[in-house]
Image (cartoon, helix red, strand yellow):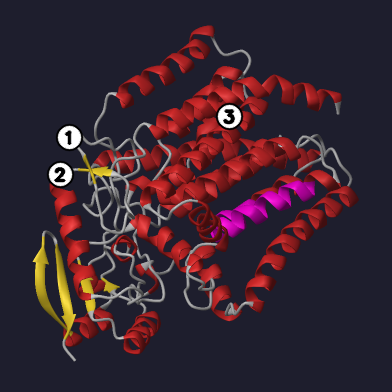
Amino acid sequence: MATEKRLILRSALPAALVFAAAWAFHRSYAGFGIAPFDEGILIDGAWRILRGEHFGREFLAPYGPLPYHVLALWFAIFEPSVATFRELAVVLQSVGAVLLFLAAWRLARLEGALLAAGCLILAHGSWHKSFLQLAVALQVYAASCCLDSLRIRTAAGLGLAAAVAFLCRYDVGGFAMLASGVAIIFRRDASARRRIESLASLCSAFLLVVGGVYAILAVRGLDLVEWWFLTWQRILAQEWIDAPFPRPWTRGFGWGSFSTGALFVALATAALCYLGSILGVALRALWRRRDGADPARLCIALLGLCLTNQTRLIPSSNHFFQGALPLYLLASDLLSRNGRPWWIRLWMPVFTALLFLWVLRGTSGLYPASFTARIEDAIRLELPTGRAGVRIAAADAAVLETLVKAVLEVTADGESIATSPRCPLVAFLCDRPLAQPFAEPSYYYRNARYQQRVIEALDRTRPRIWVHDPRAAATFVFPEAAPLLFEYFTRHYRAARAIGPYSLFMRAD
């Protein structure tokens, strides 16, 4: 206990400095850019809860309930806007960097921990995935702490961390439980009874938290059958996104260049090699009944492998970074172990500092409204609803301001509108409820069941306005990905006005 207290005191100041650096870095560009598709997915769900709707009853979502409810509470305390959402995201990203730093410092040297935190700060992922990043960071930190010794209490801590991850993202929580269970099983410094007790503690803590939350949601109207179907689909394969593997050479795969494929191959190879080395030690230990592999490293390596595999199912290069936290830690571990030459250990903080200086000089990012998207000559997006609060290019601001004013002119307060899959955030910007029962269009991509569910909701509400953006959403084109819904759209709505890339459609019947 005294050793643990000394470790906490020793880590307090460096952790505070990492948080301050991460917060200052993210805050420097958090007020720029807007993502009408991605940010709309999370913000719409939180706004629905704020309006009195219930998760899983009035609306569905492909992620866990925690992000929507936390953001709804944040909106209740502060005004709902894109800017206030970004403030929360900055805090979440900064906390994630601290957790990764502390986990890396337990397994590697200080310079390696700084390298891991620096990589995460610089390549953190899009704003709407801040909860995902925090869930992974929490699980990595829990593995570094709780697997030092195999006790009932520490196993329960792992289960609690996995439960929080599950409530943020089903796949992350499922992978966390798998990785934690494997790490416990492969320990050889505990009896079989202790390992069984620890596994039971792990599962009990996880089920207690997750079961309690979903029992409350079920009482409030959650469709448990529908939720189970979507959860299992999310953990296993994300069936609605049908991308071949590894597909680095097509235009649909993010940057559309071989560098994307090389990046994925490098990450996957690193994870496989590291995991393979750990599993090799563990298997030899089991065979010869000697001490097994480091359980914390085994857990983190397996989690990173699962997440890397999951990201390859999503055809966009920025998704690599949502599962890269364990790989940042593993790289810092390999590069900063005792016995490494001094120049390698010195190179890591210097390299991290140079990366920061290079990125701070940039004015464009790898991904809109996420990676250091500072915009030169940006102006504040002024909307009558006050729902933005960010700065964007003057031409884009003029388009969105005109679009919002046009929608407000023909709709009343509380009247719902429909949007195409590319722009669910527009409904929030207009302060009008979204008529579709979910903002995430991947539900009805190539799925007739969910397309029909959207059509039924539109028939009930009969929104007069449909805001259409013909551009691709997550590489999918509306007419091809959701033909039944697109046919409904073309049959019931007629073009009324074009505003930049958007078009206002009016209901014809």
Q: Nearer the viewer, mark 2 or mark 3?
A: 2
> Up-down: is 381 above or below 507?
above
Discs 2, 1 touching: Cβ within 8 Å? yes
Residue with the mark numbered 1: 377
Label located before the other in sequence (2 or 3) = 3
Q: CA distance from mark 1 to mark 3?
A: 35 Å
In-front residue for pair 294/74: 74
Discs 1, 3 touching: Cβ within 8 Å? no
Q: Left or right: 448 with respect to 234?
A: left
Q: Which mark is residue 394?
A: 2
Which residue ends up furthest to the bottom in the rendered image?
509
Q: Left or right: 268 with respect to 176?
A: left
In the rendered image, residue 65 lying in the magenta stretch gets the answer: no
- Kind of residue sitting beneath label 3: Phe
Badge 3 marks a residue whose secondary structure is helix
Residue with the mark numbered 3: 101
**Magenta segment, which residues?**
155-176
Can residue 89 be seen here? The reply is yes
- Kind of residue sitting beneath label 1: Asp
